Image (cartoon, rainbow, N blue to C red):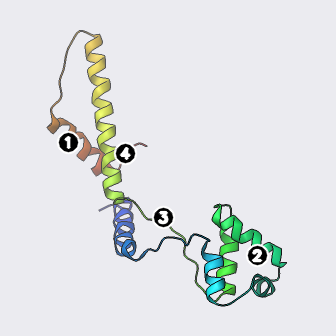
Amino acid sequence: MNALKVNRKEIDSGAKSLKPKLVAAPAFGWIRNVRQALGMSQKDLARRIGVNPKTIHSLEVNEINSKIQIDSLKKLADAMDCDFYYGFVPRKSLEATYEAQARRNAESHLARVMNTMALEKQSVKFSKSRVEEIVNELLESESVKW
């Protein structure tokens, strides 16, 4: 098994075990939610990271608007004695995504061949098994194009 396939399988395995444990972000964001759960004011949090309390308000708004920087989130999490996690969780397995792209590559290739042959007045049809052969070749050689 080559390195790319191993990497996809590792990510898929980790994501599969992680997905059921994921929690949607609170409506007012993690910063505000955790800060308030700790009974910490914006002023308290600001003092812990060495900024103005207005900055905490801005950071909370930026989090809700998806405009906050990762380093800010790390700093804030640390100030509230939390760990910060960042990652991508595939909607379906990466292996399935890669395979679907290989299928699109194979179908596109065969469509071009059929078009070329039709231009030469040579009609040609390809079976599903031929599509599968090309898909398997692309997967084996890790030569799927995006």
| Disc 2 target residue | 56
Q: Between label 2 and label 1, give the one nearer the viewer.
A: 2
The Cα atoms of the two marked residues, 1 and 3, are separated by 30 Å
Task: Write down the quadrant of residue 138 in the picture.
Answer: top left
Question: Which of the two discs, 3 and 2, labels the residue nearer the N terminus?
Answer: 2
The residues tagged by marks 4 and 1 sit, at their Cα atoms, a distance apart of 14 Å
Q: Are marks 2 and 4 in contact (CB under 8 Å)?
A: no
Q: Where in the figure is residue 126, as x and y percent of width and height? A: 18, 29
- Given the current orientation, which residue lies at the most extreme top position? 121
Residue under the point 66% across and 67% down: 63
Tell me which label, 2 or 4, sits earlier in the chain.
Answer: 2
Q: Which residue is mark 1?
A: 132
Question: Which label belongs to residue 88?
Answer: 3
Q: Nearer the viewer, mark 3 or mark 2?
A: 2
Residue 145's spot in the image, x, y percent? 40, 42
Give the residue drawn at x 65%, y 61%: 65
- Measured in 3D between alpha carbons, the distance from the residue under mark 3 to the one under mark 2, in whole angstroms, is 26 Å
Image position, residue 30 (x, y; %)? 60, 75
* Distance between mark 3 and mark 4 Cα atoms: 21 Å
Q: Which mark is residue 27?
A: none
Above or below, comparing residue 114 to residue 98 in the picture: above
Residue type of the residue flagged with mark 2: Ile
The mark that comes first in sequence, 1 or 3, is 3
Q: In which quadrant of the rendered view does residue 50 lie? A: bottom right
Q: Give the mark nearest the N terminus, 3 or 4.
A: 3
